[in-house]
Amino acid sequence: MKIDYRSFNLELRETFTVSYGSRNFQPTLIVCLSDGEFTGYGEAAATSYYGVSVDKMQYSLQQIEEIIRENIQKYPEELWETTFPYLKDNLFAQAALDIAMHDLHAKRNGLPLYKQWGLELKNLPKSNYTIGIDSVERMVQKMKAFPWPLYKIKLGTKEDVRIIQELRKHTDSVFRVDANASWGLDDALYNIEELKDLNVEFIEQPLNPKDTEAMKILYKESALPLIADESCILEQDIENCAEYFHGVNIKLSKCGGLTPALRMIKKARDLGLKTMVGCMTESSVGISAIAHLTPMLDYVDMDGALLLKSDIADGIKVFADKIYFPERNGTGAILLN
């Protein structure tokens, strides 16, 4: 068994801004897990918002390389359970390892990952394309430069309603609004009332995750569906979210990879919640892993690689009207350099 680490500082097409900051580059870690015949690739993007760095992820994995080596022939779920006690405080590292292991395992069996799971590529949701916070003029320019049927609009300003009203003048595309926990209850009630007739599909994470009582009020009064993001990180969050959200957005890096994500999707569906998987700003290694979950999803946000100036990998391709799966086993992702 051999495990390699490749770190990259991914350059974005343009400055990307959300309610809690801006960036032009995205650090990311690629884990390459080899059994001597096949190599699986996994990815987790570093984020200061969650206190995660590439160095921390790599260090955490280096401490358990012997454990990984001893369990390399097991199923991905078994390796996840074995390594979780050591990586429970660094779930981003756990995610990169788990994705690599799923990729490796499916390659061993000569199958694309979705077939390994017994899924078919039917009725797949379309991915949105994200427009970060900017001046209205720049946001309009970004939409015109990247025509798309479904946009996620990042909000968190004092002019959020006006922004959507102005953007609506320039496109008939569906909007998904992501407030990134930046609204208060009064703001959310007002904004949603104003946005409900502007072809907005749902509101993602309107309030701070700690404002559970306010979320219960908003859940009862909202004219638009509410999707949890920052409120839905771990498996145990699914049941709590059922009380005050209509759906959940699951992030592989946050929850610890594909193994817990599969359980979270099943739990959410059992509770009648809409299911969504979102991405970080990441390469086609991470995006390709997400794509294999789409047969189980109502919504998907997998535009991370589209936001990059250049990709470091080749794999799943996201188009406006479809998702293209290459004829490769595993996740279908390969590194380009």
Image (cartoon, grey):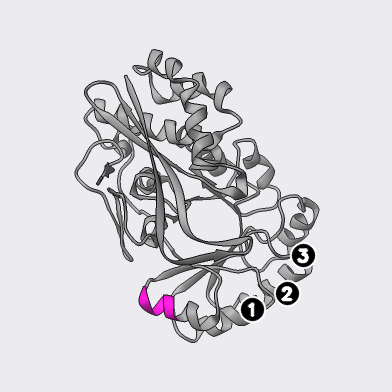
Q: Secondary structure at mark 3?
A: helix
Instruction: Tell me where residue 41 sits by quadrant.
Output: top left
The numbered mark at residue 161 is: 1
Instruction: Tell me where residue 38 sits by quadrant.
Output: top left
Q: Secondary structure at mark 1?
A: helix
- Which residue is at the front of the view, 107 or 200? 107
> Which residues, given as a range, are shown in magenta?
141-146
Would residue 16 be seen by someone viewing this image from the given angle?
Answer: yes
Q: Residue at x 50, y 71 (%)?
A: 175
Quadrant assignment for the C terminus: top left
The numbered mark at residue 185 is: 3
The answer to which of marks 1 and 3 sits earlier in the sequence is: 1
Q: Give how far apart the Cα atoms at labels 1 and 3 are.
A: 15 Å
Is the magenta region chiefly helix, strand or loop? helix
Q: Is residue 294 magenta?
A: no
Task: State the residue lying farthest toward the right.
Answer: 213
The numbered mark at residue 188 is: none
User: Whole-percent x and y of residue 210?
Assistant: 76, 50
Residue on which disc 2 sits? 190
In the rendered image, the vertical position of residue 256 relative to residue 131, given as above or below: above
In the rendered image, the vertical position of residue 155 relative to residue 216, given as above or below: below
Quadrant assignment for the N terminus: top left
User: Whole-percent x and y of residue 187?
Assistant: 74, 70
The answer to which of marks 2 and 1 sits earlier in the sequence is: 1
In the picture, measured across the screen, residue 214 lies left or right of residue 110, that is right
